[in-house]
Amino acid sequence: MEEYLLKVDKVQTVFKTGKGEITSVEEVSFQLKPGQTIGIVGESGCGKSVTSLSIMRLLGKHGYVKNGSILFNGKDLAKISEAEMREIRGNEISMIFQEPMTSLNPVFTIGNQMMEGIRLHMKLGKKEARNYAIEMLNSVGIPRSEAIMNEFPHALSGGMRQRVMIAMALSCRPRLLIADEPTTALDVTIQAQILELMKKLRSQSNTAIILITHDLGVVAEMVDKIIVMYAGQVVEEADVFTLFDNPKHPYTKGLIGSIPHIETHQEDRLISIPGAVPSLQNMPTGCRFHTRCEFATERCLQEQPNLIQLDETGEHKVRCWLAEEEAYVSRENKEVFV
Amino acid sequence: MFQYIIRRLLIAIPVLLGVTIFNFFIINLAPGNPVDMFVNPNMSAADILAKKEALGLNDPLWEQYGRWMGSMLQGDFGYSFATYEPVLDNIAARIGPTLLLMGTALIIAYLIAIPVGILSATKQYSFIDYLTTTFSFFGISIPNFFLGLGAIYVFGIVFPIFPTGGMTTLGSSGGFVDTFMHLVLPAMVLGTAIAGSMVRYVRSSMLEVLGQDYLRTARAKGLREFFVNNKHALRNALIPIVTIIGLEIPLLIGGAVVTEQIFQWPGLGQLTIQSIGSRDYPMLMALNFIAAFTVLFSNLLTDLMYSVVDPRIKYN
Ligand SMILES: Nc1ncnc2c1ncn2[C@@H]1O[C@H](COP(=O)(O)OP(=O)(O)OP(=O)(O)O)[C@@H](O)[C@H]1O
Ligand SMILES: [Mg+2]
């Protein structure tokens, strides 16, 4: 139990709107050990960002975690006071955001924004904080870091800004780093550099990482474990090899089938999943994927499947009636762990 | 930067020229003329004509305008028809009080509008927000003279705390405290009238900023909400707010004319009203010229302020 750094259990996050509450994410559960990297994948709008913002408790005025718990170091982040949460944010848990172009404040210098968190959490004086910030910028490979300290964000390219964000996020040596699509907005070469950088930093400081992306290719080479999300729920969880070799959920299979391969022959078409993610106001009953699933049965339309464990170690989990029934058959009615 | 300023000043010249032409003809369209103002029953028609001739009022309008322009370019704004003193001397004596009144009013307006606007935006749709919105619409829609009369009634008659007219107590030598006491009511009236519209600007500007991604970044660092709002958000919200100084100055000038009249404040606004009454053409031309110049200059100042508060803007 105690070996987990983060234990997210059946979290439900809702937003209050003019027309009542809408549930953005529910039944999200996963665990993370120190130094481990977990990937969250899924199509746009499936709740990846909301999941990470729930952990940071940065859902804005209208969003909150309604059910479930988020245990970090034994503390439930959904319950602790705002003051306690501030102590954790930027200190023990940091986050890199999806949009490097808009995530830095345009009217303050890089140095000013870097030093804020450092001074707050590390209690350094102005001069030490400045030197430390320069050191951090160097460590993420920013050239002329001393001059960059006095620059405003608009003078930096997207890749450089994301490096600044990473330097900022890592400056207080967090135990958990949440990277929400850190490379989506960047071009491919910069993307590779940023991922290399994150790998290097991970090996240096044993930081646990939650890497969010909708690019399975990125995840494959970075993470230990993958969570696949669909329409606000976790639909499959497995280590990288299992997930790619033996995906169980039809949605996961679809996602993997849609990655282009160098060896793909011209005549082999990439598989695309028909249809789109259902809207929050309009969630289908039963399995949420049934509207797009070619294997959907009567049961899938009626009953919602649970996230069940497929193997004894409990590392591979899936939310699908088909997989559940298959597991029953193959284990010849051995008990299924729920 | 320097070149930019020069360029802007050059562009201002034709605008100013247009304004003077326009003013000159408008003033002359007003019924009556300066001589009517000091006619007395003992003057004969010939005397009046001679007087008009002496003032050059019988010449064609364009010739009068040319004469005015010619001497203005040499820095000579002529003599007042009413006081027979040089126009510039009269204006110089009055410009101080007006600047004092307008400056204080502007400071009051900002002191009210910035905190109230921030509060109203951060607590959007709360009771406080509705309350400030209601009050700011009062501020916008109540005419200055009405507010002025109300202030005189309440603070001058019901609770006689502040003097209600002039800039110093008659017969006294003035001094800081005395002037301050005289300044309170007119500056408050002028300031709150402007604060009304300013609160709306601050609120909407702040609301726009409050949804930005960089505030989430600031929160993710563990900063207190106070710093997030008053450092990260406010600094961005201020960018459009400083620009409205340029919009407020014309309002301020207009407001000062009325407010000075109500409170007998010896400034340019009061002088303007008096000069209109006496059809003091040279004085009115000079006052209009100053007003136009101030508005153009404050627009330039606004643009320059932009580049100070927003690092993304550089003029060249
Ligand atoms: N502040 C909010 N108010 C209401 N609904 C929201 C809010 N933020 C997110 N949502 C909803 O929650 C759902 C999940 O959004 P989320 O941003 O987590 O998607 P995502 O998986 O991160 O997608 P992307 O890949 O595009 O970043 C969406 O349907 C979105 O409309
Ligand atoms: Mg997202």
Image: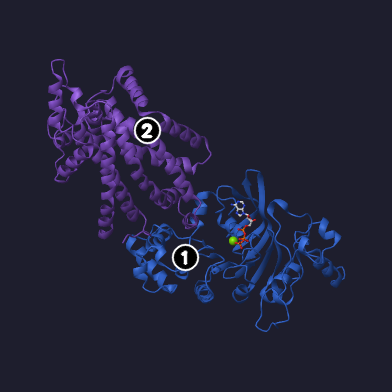
Chain colours: A blue, B purple
Decide if residue A34 is on the left or right side of residue B142: right
- The kind of residue on which mark 2 rests is Ala
Residue A121 in view, yes or no: yes
The secondary structure type at the circle numbered 2 is helix
Q: What is the x, y in percent for residue A119?
A: 39, 59
Q: What is the x, y in percent for residue B259?
A: 30, 29
Residue at label 2? B193
Residue at screen point 24% across, 40% down? B289
- Gap between marks 2 and 1 measured at Cα: 44 Å
Q: What is the x, y in percent for residue B69?
A: 19, 43
Residue at screen point 82% across, 60% down? A300
* Picture layout, residue A38 above or below residue B56: below
* Picture layout, residue A264 above or below residue B92: below
Residue at screen point 41% across, 28% down? B142
Residue at label 1? A165
Mark 2: few/some/many CA within 10 Å (<14, 14-19, 20+): many
Q: Quadrant of residue A251?
A: bottom right
Q: Is mark 1 within 8 Å of ligand 2?
A: no
Name the quadrant where ligand 1 sits: bottom right
- The kind of residue on which mark 1 rests is Met
Question: Tag on residue B220?
Answer: none
